[in-house]
């Protein structure tokens, strides 16, 4: 049960952090070919390593949560 809670919180942290970065990148009026581009804005600020880190945190959290669900040892 502890693994499920830890994994769920890590997944939630990664997803919320990623969504905040994506939403914050669209706050500016930068456009590419007349269309808004969040990934271009994120690269202009140099936040792509942070985005990759947040994605990795979310994936690790999801794996831990699924591992906790299917763990045979139940105390």
Image (spheres, rainbow, N blue to C red):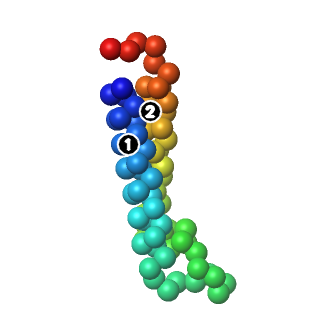
Residue that badge 1 annotates: 10
Q: Could you tell me if the residues under marks 1 and 2 are in contact, i.e. CB atoms within 8 Å? A: yes
Per the model, the C-alpha gap separating discs 1 and 2 is 9 Å
* 13 up-or-down from 61: above or below: below
Residue 51 shows in the view: yes
Q: Residue at x 44, y 79 (%)?
A: 27
Q: Residue at x 49, y 41 (%)?
A: 59
Question: At which x and y percent is residue 17?
Answer: 39, 57
Q: Residue at x 37, y 50 (%)?
A: 13
Q: Quadrant of the C terminus?
A: top left
In this orientation, which residue lies closer to the viewer: 27 or 40?
27
In this orientation, which residue lies closer to the viewer: 7 or 59?
7
Q: Quadrant of the N terminus?
A: top left
Q: Label 1's element? A: helix
In this orientation, which residue lies closer to the viewer: 68 or 56?
68
* 44 up-or-down from 47: above or below: below
Residue 49 shows in the view: no
Question: At which x and y percent is residue 42?
Answer: 48, 69
Residue that badge 2 annotates: 65
Question: At which x and y percent is residue 62?
Answer: 48, 38
Question: At which x and y percent is residue 39?
Answer: 55, 68
């Amino acid at each position: 049960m502890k693994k499920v809670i830890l994994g769920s919180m890590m997944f939630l942290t990664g997803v919320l952090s990623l969504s905040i970065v994506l939403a914050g990148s669209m706050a500016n009026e930068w456009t590419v070919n007349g269309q808004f581009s969040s990934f271009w804005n994120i690269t202009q600020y140099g936040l792509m390593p942070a985005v990759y880190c947040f994605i990795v945190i979310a994936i690790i959290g999801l794996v831990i949560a699924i591992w906790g669900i299917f763990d045979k040892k139940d105390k």
